[in-house]
Image (cartoon, rainbow, N blue to C red):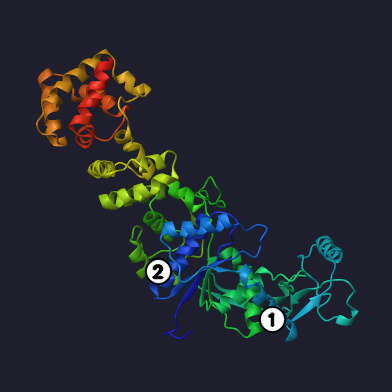
Amino acid sequence: MSSAELIVTRFAPSPTGYLHIGGARTALFNWAYAKGKQGKMLLRIEDTDLERSNPAAVDAILDGLAWLGLNWDGEAVSQHARQQRHAAVAHELLNSGKAYYCYCSPEELTAMREKAQVEKRPVRYDGTWRDRDPNLAPTGVKPVIRFKSPQEGETVINDHAQGRVIIPNKDLDDLIVLRSDGNPTYNLSVVVDDHDMGITDIIRGVDHLTNAARQTQVYLAMGWRVPNMTHVPLIHGPDGAKLSKRHGALGVEAYRAMGYLPAALRNYLARLGWSHGDEEIFSTQQLVEWFSLDGINNSPARFDFAKLENLNGHYIRHTSDDDLLNEFIRFLPFVAGGTELVGRIDAVMRSKLLKAMPGLKERAKTLVELKAAVAYLFSHRPLTLDEKAKALLDDEGKAALASVHAVLAGSNDWTAQALETAVKAHAEGTGIKLGKFAQPLRAALTGTATSPGIFDVLEVLGRDEALGRVADQMSQL
């Protein structure tokens, strides 16, 4: 490859469901490599299987990529829309003698498969029609077109992650490139699309390694250059087993609903199978600058929710209050009751949320926890107390609430620091521990037994709202 050649990668998901976490990592690697080389990442929707493909899945993939901040260049390409081009290449192979018509019936293929199983051989097409005279073709049978795979020698893949992979050609049978109904098959379509789209580098999961050998043969048969290939190890669970839903094999939209920040998820996914020295936490810009194919590991990565949550907490703490609030607002529609809350965030509420953010983000590891922590701001008076809050307002709690209400009402400086000083002085003066006042106050202000720092809550709520909530509970005692 010329040093001046434009690097072009691609992300090519099948629209049969959500954008799963492994696909998101593949997209991230392609995106980071292309951006770091001032190249392009293209998006191709591999929708040739119309029975399994659906528009909702395409939308989920596009939405997931957009949320992750992985933008692609140009319009997304539909593989199905290019079927005529794929079929034309199949006929080019046929006309050049590098493919042939196969008239085997389903019954013959079944018998071939059963014989191989009995003889304990790999199940492969035996080449029945490879060199047979087409004049012997049965009448009324629509043939498939099979690629004439080399029978001797080896197919070599010089892979950036897996090293030099050698596959004996005898282990690869003559794959179908065009079905009897005229529809092209996956391995042909991928080669034609990657060639026509000018893909220079293919970065995908190691489960495509066998496909890579077949595709390499088609490239060579067409006289096309084989793209550089990097097959990334799969993601396993923390126990080393294949990633499942209990481990984290979920769609990207699930991680959004669980309250993870896109930047944190990008950072975490980048470290699943790639490394830059001992760096664990890095910005997206650093990822783009540092990313190299040589940094991709050749052993499976292990997904760990605890590590992801801790990393997300770091990002929450180090995101500016204003940016974090914007992320929080974008997150709300994806959780129960969140859309209603978005409608209530006017200028006043936004100001309160911003004021609360410094204290909140020191404790929250996810936006879900952040939502729970700010719930008191959205509560309507009079508050409905949960059972633990009710228990705090027993006879002793009632007396403490009335006592501290008088202290708060007499305060002229409504800041967390001034209010804390006043209440502490009151506690010392009465010989009662501060917690005996703070806990009933927390129950009255938030309706719960847990909340951010109670003096922060007082300041964020504001004088009138805070005193009103305390008065509401006093009137019911």
Q: Position of residue 67 (x, y in %)?
A: 42, 56
Q: Position of residue 4 (x, y in %)?
A: 42, 85
**Is 100 positioned to the left or the right of 231 in the image?**
right
Q: Is residue 168 above or below residue 348?
A: below
Q: Position of residue 196 (x, y in %)?
A: 57, 79
Disc 2 packing (10 Å; few <14; some 14–19; many ≥20): many
- Judge by depth and name the residue closer to the eye, 196 or 151: 196
Q: Which mark is residue 382?
A: none
**Residue drawn 22% across the image and 37% down it:** 460
Residue beneath disc 2:
291
Q: Which mark is residue 153?
A: 1
Q: SS class of the residue under badge 2?
A: loop
**Residue drawn 61% across the image and 72% down it:** 190
Name the outermost residue toward the top. 395
Whichever of callouts 1 and 2 sits on the residue coming sooner in the sequence is 1
Q: Looking at the picture, which amino acid does disc 2 mark?
A: Phe
Disc 1 packing (10 Å; few <14; some 14–19; many ≥20): few
**Residue drawn 44% across the image and 80% down it:** 6
Q: Position of residue 151 (x, y in %)?
A: 74, 79
Q: SS class of the residue under badge 1?
A: loop
Q: Looking at the picture, which amino acid does disc 1 mark?
A: Gly
* Any part of residue 161 in sight: no
**Is 460 positioned to the left or the right of 172 in the image?**
left
**Is 442 positioned to the left or the right of 237 in the image?**
left
* Any part of residue 256 in sight: yes
